[in-house]
Amino acid sequence: MPFITRSVTSVLSFDADGSHLAVPTSDGEVGVWDVDRRKQLTRGAPRPSGNTLVGFGPGGSVVAYLAAKNQVQIHNLTGDGATDTLAVAGDNWTMGFVRGPLLTIDTGYLRQTFDLRPDTQFRTLCAAAGRDYTAAERKLLPQGTPSKPPCS
């Protein structure tokens, strides 16, 4: 992978098997490289200034922490390039990491672990709500959430 002066601005992240590398750049994007072929595969996952690349998420996504909003951004690098967000409790982001489909966030006061798979999020929210979702709630669910009614 060629290294140019405008390329690295924060943490680099390898995927689980070490075959892909995510590189945040000064122009506000994340480039993904095929390590063995030394070829850039994609550019795109927006990484607004001052935010932190966390790592690779499930299904060809890159995960970043949005400090100003206390949110985690999950940007799909394949398909339609959709971006989902996840609210984080607390405002003292210390660190975060992704292992498989699980995102762990530590704020110094609280450690939270989220399963990033939409079907698992759906089941978890359904169990917590104990009822069907309203139309307004359904609009907030992540892309890929099953269309069938919850909790049935």
Image (spheres, rainbow, N blue to C red):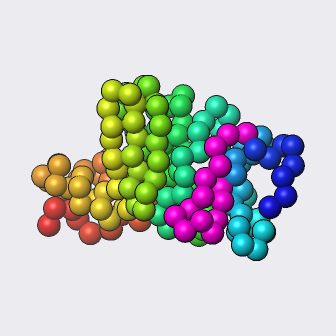
In-image side of 38 versus 72 (left or right): right
Please, is residue 62 above or below residue 79 in the view?
A: above
Q: Which residues fall within the magenta stretch?
A: 9-22
Depth check: 77 or 150 in front?
Answer: 77
Residue at point 17% right, 49% down? Answer: 128
**Residue 130 on image: x %, y %:** 12, 52
Residue at point 71% right, 56% down? Answer: 31
Does the magenta run of residues contain 13? yes
Q: Main secondary structure of the magenta part?
A: loop
Please, is residue 45 above or below residue 106 in the view?
A: below
In-image side of 27 versus 68 (left or right): right
Q: Is residue 140 visible?
A: no
Q: Residue furthest bottom?
A: 37
Please, is residue 148 above or below residue 74 in the view?
A: below
Q: Is residue 132 visible?
A: yes
Residue at point 32% right, 32% down? Answer: 110
Q: Give the position of the N terminus as an image quadrant.
A: bottom right
**Image quadrant assignment for residue 44:** bottom right
Question: In this figure, what is the number of numbered marks?
Answer: 0
Depth check: 85 or 53 in front?
Answer: 53
**Residue 102 on image: x %, y %:** 38, 55
**Image quadrant assignment for residue 150:** bottom left
**Image quadrant assignment for residue 66:** top right
**Residue 51 on image: x %, y %:** 60, 36
**Residue 19 on image: x %, y %:** 63, 69
In-image side of 136 versus 41 (left or right): left
Residue at point 64% right, 43% down? Answer: 11
